[in-house]
Amino acid sequence: MRVGGALKYNKLLFVNVAPLLVLLGCASARYLPSSSGTYPPTSSVVVYYWDKPDRPYMEMGTINVKAYSETGMLEKFKQKAMEIGADGVFIKSMDNQLRFDTHIWFLLVAPIRAEGVAIKFKDTSLEKRQSEKRFLRGKG
């Protein structure tokens, strides 16, 4: 009698907890480059919401993220941006409308889908020094 009750309890616990664990662990990021340049990975990135940075930069490409929490979304943006060598990412759009998720067929969930732009800051001091050297050599 006791064994059957414990088994029933474990099954009930699994059915109720497993979907939550799946939701917490599922997040994905996809990168679509807009240029052919590649960069070494970076160790940190700056995340901008809606507003573009004030510093000069170039757009490296688009990062699309799907996550089930804002924290998971930010982590995926940072992880993918560092992986491709970006200095930052600005988030252009977010959508978390309730819809039937095809990957988790038994749940009606509200995943966050977000799009951001990976950026590489331009080193204006380096560009200025290089242009001064060209001018002094008579090549500018």
Image: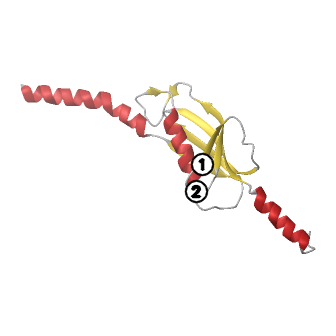
Considering the numbered disc 2 on the image, is that residue within a helix, a strand or a loop? Answer: loop
The C terminus lies in quadrant: bottom right
Type of amino acid at the residue the image marks with label 2: Thr
Q: Is residue 50 left or right of residue 22?
A: right
Residue occupying the far bottom of the picture: 137
Residue 102 locus on image (x, y percent): 48, 34
Q: Is residue 10 left or right of residue 63?
A: left
Q: Which residue is located at x 72 percent, y 42 percent?
A: 53
Residue 32 locus on image (x, y percent): 64, 50
Q: Is residue 109 left or right of residue 62?
A: left
Q: Which residue is located at x 53 percent, y 24 percent?
A: 98
Residue occupying the far left of the picture: 1
Q: Which of 128 and 45 lies nearest the eye of the viewer?
A: 128
Bin the neighbour count of mark 2 within 10 Å (Cα to Cα): few under 14, some 14-19, many 20 and up.
some
Asked if 67 appears above or below 4 in the picture, the reply is below
Q: Which of 78 and 127 lies nearest the eye of the viewer?
A: 127
Q: Which of 14 and 88 lies nearest the eye of the viewer?
A: 88
Asked if 123 appears above or below 132 in the picture, the reply is above
Asked if 12 appears above or below 59 in the picture, the reply is above
Q: Quadrant of residue 91?
A: top right
Residue carrying label 2: 42
The N terminus lies in quadrant: top left
Residue carrying label 1: 45
Q: Are marks 2 and 1 in contact (CB under 8 Å)?
A: yes
Q: Which residue is located at x 44 percent, y 40 percent?
A: 26
